[in-house]
Amino acid sequence: MTRRPTSTPWTPDSWRSRPAAQQPVWPDEGELKRVHAQLAGLPPLVFAGEARHLTRALGQAAEGRAFVLQAGDCAESFSEFSADAIRDKLKVILQMAVVLTYGSGVPVVKVGRIAGQFAKPRSSPTEQVGDQVIESFRGHMVNDDLPERSARVPDPNRLVAAYQQSVSTLNLLRAFTKGGFADLSQVHAWNQQFVASSAEGQQFEDIAEGIDRALRFMAACGINLTAEDSLHEVDFWTSHEALILDYEEALTRRDSLTEEWYDCSAHMLWVGERTRQLDGAHCEFLSGINNPIGSKIGPSATADDVIDLCERLNPQRVPGRLTLITRFGVDAIDRALPPLLRAVRDQGHPVVWVCDPMHGNTFTAEGGQKTRRFDDIIGELKGFFRAHQSEGTWPGGVHVELTGDDVTECLGGVEDIVEGQLHQRYTTTCDPRLNARQALDLAFGVAELLRS
Ligand code: TRP
Ligand code: MN
């Protein structure tokens, strides 16, 4: 592994001297430069102090005193952008968070894959459509998903549109989470509705009833459930994959208080399985920003790879600085995860272990849609908890792709969606997401795993 010579310090653009995977080829360099300058002059989306706050919260998760819920779209969309969609997504995440808080008995750190999650890495740069070969769709931050050659031409003005959509999304999230929508009693009432109308309601009734009793107990002790700020406000953080480095660099600013660099496009940024090369541009970029950061880890990663990644991204061993998001698939998790847990533990690296049970369980259905089985997703989560139990490490959280809409993209769940139904409401621009009921089903399942 090559180390950076000490003579070349990190700068927001030092990634440019490294190989950068998955970057679009922008047709007009001049236009890109103009957009870059424009973005660099726009206000940051988040404040450095917030990112530090999140690092501390994640540090608790690294030490077994908090649990992380990271959730949202696979890819946000320019076309499906509405206040209702944001509200419904937040609503599911909050409902899940209540259940997980009860199940784990520790604070749940709520992190959205939202307000910036607009870019997708692709396994192939091109795609066959009829008799034409066209550029792959790379997320609305880069090009359009219409299967036409002209739609797929990367347009840097989309970086500005993504910024603007992120601004208004984050503005609404801040309003909802601090303005009363996140009220604990209200969120619990939504969960009770879900339990009452769910086929597996009986199974989850215990948990819902337990939360109810806890709330009544607090009220009986004299705690005013409506006056207490902490019961109707939540901290909600944003995150996305730091993929398009032109965008991330333009939003990277020096904090006026500490003089340190922060990528102010989101509170937390992660690097994907396809872009986490130690000497690559993405690790170089993430290594120098002071936000909490993450890396996806797939089945090909060896224990040495993971240790090298920890050294590269968190040499100071700051708890909460680095989250490892594992995505092995239900068949590989029992074999692949334990050696990594042992190696990281033995090296004394403080990481937050988060399970992404989605990306290792994707396959193509008969009808051509990408999908995932709910049972495989739960199966991988069970393997994750089993591995941590046997290694004596803390299962720090879960990372899922979901939507508040009633889509038919993943198979199974309470309503038992079957392959023939996938086409009914299949609206994702990228990977299949859990619908609201499947997401709640998952949260109750994880709460049981946490309790046992
Ligand atoms: N503020 C607390 C927290 O964030 C409790 C809380 C209030 C809460 N509303 C919530 C928890 C909604 C989960 C969901 O944990
Ligand atoms: Mn995805």
Image: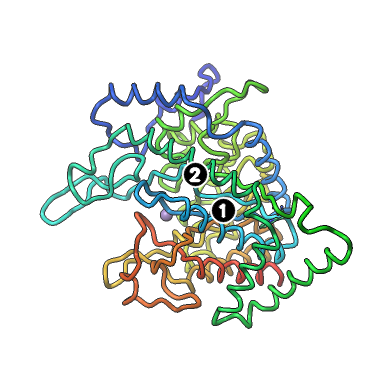
Colouring used for the render? rainbow
The quadrant holding residue 159 is: top left
Front in this rendered view, residue 190 or 22: 190
Question: Residue 73 appears at what percent x and percent y?
Answer: 45, 54
Mark earlier in primary sequence (1, 2):
1
Q: Which residue is labeled 2 in the image?
A: 169
Q: Is residue 131 visible?
A: yes
Q: Considering the numbered disc 1 on the image, is that residue within a helix, a strand or a loop?
A: strand
Crowdedness of circle 2 by 10 Å Cα count: few (<14), some, many (20+)?
many
Give the CA separation, mark 1 to mark 2: 17 Å
- Whether residue 445 is situated above or below residue 433 in the rendered picture: below
Farthest residue, direction top: 7
Give the residue furthest to the left. 131
Q: Quadrant of ligand 2?
A: bottom left
Q: Is residue 18 above or below residue 447?
A: above
Q: Specify the amino acid type for callout 1.
A: Gln
Q: Which residue does the image show at 24% across and 26% down from the upper left?
A: 28
> Is residue 248 shown left or right of residue 418?
right
Q: Quadrant of the C terminus?
A: bottom right
Indicate the position of residue 205 as horizontal and vertical percent values.
Answer: 67, 78
Nearest the viewer among 132 and 19 is 132
For residue 97, which numbered disc appears in the image?
A: none
Q: Look at the numbered disc 2 and give the secondary structure of its residue.
A: helix
Question: Which quarter of the figure has residue 108?
Answer: bottom right
Residue at point 67% right, 23% down? Answer: 258
Q: Please indicate whether residue 412 sits to the left or right of residue 187 in the image.
A: left
Mark 1: few/some/many CA within 10 Å (<14, 14-19, 20+): many
Mark 1 or 2, closer to the camera:
2
Contact, CB < 8 Å: mark 1 with mark 2?
A: no
Determine which residue is flagged by label 1: 70
Query: Looking at the picture, how far across and down is residue 432, in whole percent?
Result: 40, 62
Q: Which residue is found at the position 35% from the left and 40% from the top?
A: 22
